[in-house]
Every structure is written in structure tokens, then in C-alpha cells.
Image: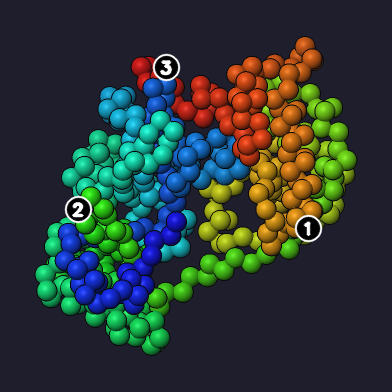
Amino acid sequence: MALKTLKEIYNSTNRNDFDKLLKHRVVVSEKISSASFHVQRKTNGVEFFKSNSNTPITIIDRTLSSLYETAIKYIKAIDTAALLDMPTDWKFGFEYLPTLEFSKIKYDNIPTNTLILTHIQEVNAEGKVKKVLTDPIILNKWSNVLGVQAPNIVFDGYLDFGQRSALKELLGERLNKYAYESIDKVSFTRAAYSIFDKNVYKTALNDTLDKEIDSLVLSFADNNKVNTYKIEDPYRKINEEKSSNHVYQITVLDLLEYLSTYDISKIQLTEETANKRYIETMSVIFNEYIAKNATKYIGVDFGGAEFSKNELFEINKAFINNETTLKYIENKLLAELFKITLGTFRKKKNKSNDLLSEDMVNVLNGIVDKIKEKIFVESTDENSVYDYNNFVIYNKVKGTESITENKNNEDDTLTFKQFIK
């Protein structure tokens, strides 16, 4: 869930209540425009998560994009003793910036080992968050242990009268001027930082205060409750409009039409785990689809934001074993098409949207069921290896939306064997 801005609270809250909020202890940190990455040690290894998902990153995620490979590789290489010190009920949350080109903000530097530790979630056995740790002392300690950058704490304490007044001025008429007058947009960074520390001369990843930042995050402690808001420059206009991609829609529609009559049962699988069998299945389908339909995609542009064209978003070939598929995806356009094929049919859709009508969703979900059945039902082919554990899991959760990987699969987790090497 996106953070509310402090300006929203300023405009909607009684002035006396807002003044009370500003008198609580506050920790101010800079938010980086980057990806979110989480790490949790389990008794049998380490699991990785994107954003706030409770589902670990799988080899399907890692095939669709190489984005998280740098972070995963780094965590796997951390000293064994440091990894074993990580409590198993703590999920470490990072801002992840593997390359400057990835961010919408133009930074001068990337974080130490590409990661900034921003918080630690204390979770129960089901992965539900019980508590979020943001204490700078704890975060600094674990940043050192893990060899990553500590959060940029701009201020930690109680705001004095002058700071509270300056903050309200920034949120009031002055912030409106930033939004509607043609002034130097980088002035916001210096104005916001100077409220909390007049001696600061640089931001978390920039060498000066003369460049824009994503936002400052303010966490107010009220007894055992923490209220978190952000301050951002309203003058900065980053185009984040989400419009329907008609090329993508036509592509998915064509795939649905092709697969609606495709005999999935004829595919022979040899992989053992669910996610590998999914990739194997979709590789076979993709190859046959391309053999018949390649000419449709001559000159097609699937679009996408500029930063998404970075090589980190390219398909990861490490988990693809089909030689024909590997040959096809040497072509960048066909590689994008394979990503669409792989991503579209991995789980059911709950409802229609701008790209998929209700009828299309029903057809898609029917195809997903057939693919799941193929992946999990035991094959009678003596050349096909069947993973009994995944079949048991499937029967227990039949009807759920996503395919999960065997927890002991070394392709998705760092196992205990690797700890003690």
C-alpha cells in the first residue's frame, strides 16, 4: 500500500491534532526510487521476496527477469556466520538499486553492494507481519553485519518549534508554490532537508542537494504505534500513467485462441519440480506457437517504460533447458513474446480488467487449470520424472492461484548444505 503524503494529513486533519502529531518522536529517512527486496532465513536455507509478497521468488520469476539476480547472488555469498545469525522470524527489507539506469531518479551513486536496509519485519510461521523494526541502531548494526548500506537517517528525535513551523510552511503555501510556479524543482530537496539538518550537504545517493529525490519518509512514534508518511516534490512529474497496451492485448488474445484448442496432454515432461515443469511446458507450447505464427510479429513493438528496457529486465536463460526455445529467444522480440507467454498462464486471474474481458479471463483460467493438471498429475511415461512432494502440495491447495516451488529446491533457495560448505 502506498504511503500517504504528510500534506494529505495536513490538509485533512484538525490543526491541533496535526500539531500533536508533530510533537511525537520522528525518524526521517530518504526513500530511494528503486525495487523492493526482502530476505528471510529459514531452517533449511534463505528465501527471497520481491516487494511485500509472502510468496518467495521462484525460478519462474527469475526466468521472466534477471532483475533480482545481483541481489540474490550477493546474499548467497555473504559469510556463513552472518547468515546464521539472522533470526528465522525476521524478514529483512531492502531498497535495491543494481544500476543507476534502473531508477526514475538520476542518482550519482548506487548503494553499497546495491542494497539499503530500510526495515526488518518480525513475522509469524504463516509469514504474517507482527511488528516492523525501524530503529536506526538495529538497522545500522545489521547493515554492517550484511555488508549493505544503512538507511539515510536525516533526523531522529523531537522537532523543535522552528522545525515544526518550517515543516508546516513547506506543507502549506510554500509547497503549493513548488507545485504550480515555474521555479527550480531541485529547490525542494534543499528546502526539505534543511528543515531537519541545516548542516547536511548531500542526500543518500547524490553528492549534493541540487538534485531531485524520490521523497522523505517521516515515521512518528505514538506509544506502540508508528504513523508513517512521506513528503515529496509535487513539481516533479514522472509519467506513471498506466494505459492499455493494445499490442499486448492482441498478443494475449491470439495466445488464448491458440491454446484453447491445443492438446496440452501430449507434452512429455522430464523435469522434477513444479516450476521447472511449468517452464518446460510453456517452452514446448511457445516453440510450436512460434513455428506457426512468427510472421505475425515482424515489426511489432511491445512498448514498455524506458527503464524496463535495461538488460536487467531481459529474460534470464539460466532455467530454460529447451534448446529450441533458447534459439528463438536470441531474438529480442521473441524473447519478449516468451516472457508474455510465461507470465500470462502461470496463475488464474480473479477478475476482468482493461486488457482482459470476463470471457477472456474465463478462457485463460481454463487453460491454467489444464497446465496445472499436466504439471502435477503423474505421467505414465517411463522417461518422465514425477515429483511426489509437489503432487501432494497440489492436492492440498488445489484451486489456489499460484504454482509454488518445492522448498528444498536449490534453484530457489540457499540450502543448509550451502551454509556449511
Q: CA distance from mark 1 to mark 2?
A: 54 Å
Q: Nearer the viewer, residue 102 or 276?
A: 276
Element type at mark 1: helix
Residue type, numbered disc 2: Asn
Point out the residue furthest to the bottom here: 181
Inspect this view and state whether residue 130 appears. Answer: yes
The reply to whether the C-beta atoms of the residues labelled 1 and 2 are less than 8 Å apart is no
Query: Which percent across, then down, holds residue 36?
Result: 43, 49
Along the viewing direction, whichever of 273 and 89 lies nearer the viewer: 89
Q: Residue at x 74, y 29 (%)?
A: 373
- Disc number lying in front (2 or 3): 2
- Label 2 residue SS: loop
Residue 15 on image: x %, y %: 24, 77
Residue placed under numbered mark 2 in the picture: 223
* Sooner in the amino-acid sequence: mark 1 or mark 2: 2
Instruction: Please state which of residues 178 and 126 is positioned toward the viewer in this rendering.
Output: 126
Query: Residue at the spot x=57%, y=62% of the render?
Result: 305
Residue 355, image quadrant: bottom right
Residue shown at the point (77%, 34%) measured from the top left: 370
Q: Nearer the viewer, residue 335 or 243?
A: 243
Q: Quadrant of the N terminus?
A: bottom left
Mark seen at residue 417: 3
Above or below 244: residue 346: above
Instruction: Pinpoint residue 106: horizontal percent, then vertical percent.
Output: 40, 64
User: Mark 2: few, some, or many residues within 10 Å (few <14, many ≥20)?
Assistant: few
Q: Which residue is mark 1?
A: 250
Query: What type is the residue that disc 3 sits on?
Result: Lys
| Mark 1 or 3, nearer chain start | 1
Looking at the picture, which amino acid does disc 1 mark? Ile
Q: Position of residue 39 (x, y in %)?
A: 39, 37
Crowd tier of the residue under label 3, counting other residues whose Cα lies within 10 Å: few below 14, some 14–19, many 20 or above: few
Residue 164, relative to residue 145: is it above or below?
A: below
